[in-house]
Amino acid sequence: MTSTAPATEGLFRLLNSYGWHKMQAFVELTKSRTREELDKHKENFSSTDVAREVIAGSILQIAYVAIERYAVRKGKSDNALYFESEINRLIQENPKARSKRAFLLPEEFCVGRDIGHLPMGMIVYAGRNQYNHFGEKRLSVLNEVVFNHLHNLWPAPGNGLSFNLYGDKHFHSYSVLAALGWTDNTKELGYPAYKQDLSDVLEIEH
């Protein structure tokens, strides 16, 4: 945590600044007077979104490595076990299920507070994998199930956020940070929330 803090804090500062960049890009978009200006401002607006997603994905990567290597494991929570059992029930009931193998959450990522019925570590896991494997046609069953769970929790979150993997293909890193509660552009509370969650799963004082 100490060695990665400068990089992570810097990423969160950049993330906060891109909230303002996006607002500025939107204002410029609304001021477009010609088709040429409109196309240029649309491109700027889209590139701001991509930059924000890359920064968010980098934060998820750091959190992923911290959890994978250093988190203190205490077994799966009751909610995680219930989630596994429900997915396995659905697999058994659906003859067209994508996979017939038993569904298991990786225990090393079943750490942290619950978000819905999933532990925080699993949200980091799926978010990081979607970011790192963006170019692949489909994610693994495990990652898709996590995103489907997030989509069921927040089917229409607004503000450009989405957990729907089956719509337009794009990064979902910033949406995952929002689900984790690691975003706040006005009071810059993203990093303290991140630090609290990671400190809890690593069992370190801060």
Image: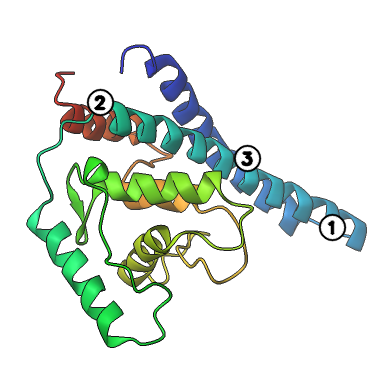
> Could you tell me how far apart the alpha carbons at marks 1 and 2 are, in whole angstroms?
47 Å
Q: Which residue is mark 2?
A: 70
Between circles 1 and 2, the one closer to the viewer is 2
In the depicted structure, whether residue 186 falls above or below residue 62: below
Q: Residue at x 77, y 51 (%)?
A: 43
Between circles 2 and 3, the one closer to the viewer is 2
Q: Earlier in the sequence, mark 3 or mark 1?
A: 1
Kind of residue sitting beneath label 3? Ala
Q: Which residue is mark 3?
A: 51
Q: Which residue is mark 1?
A: 39
Q: Residue at x 18, y 52 (%)?
A: 114
Disc sitting over residue 5 in the figure: none
Relative depth, front residue between 155 and 60: 60
Please say whether residue 188 is visible from this viewpoint: no
For the C terminus, the quadrant is: top left
Q: Earlier in the sequence, mark 2 or mark 3?
A: 3
In the depicted structure, whether residue 112 falls above or below residue 37: above
- Would you say 21 lies left or right of 86 here? right
Measured as percent of width and height from the top left, residue 89 is found at 21, 78
Is disc 3 placed on a helix, strand or loop? Answer: helix
Is disc 2 placed on a helix, strand or loop? Answer: helix
Relative depth, front residue between 25 and 154: 154
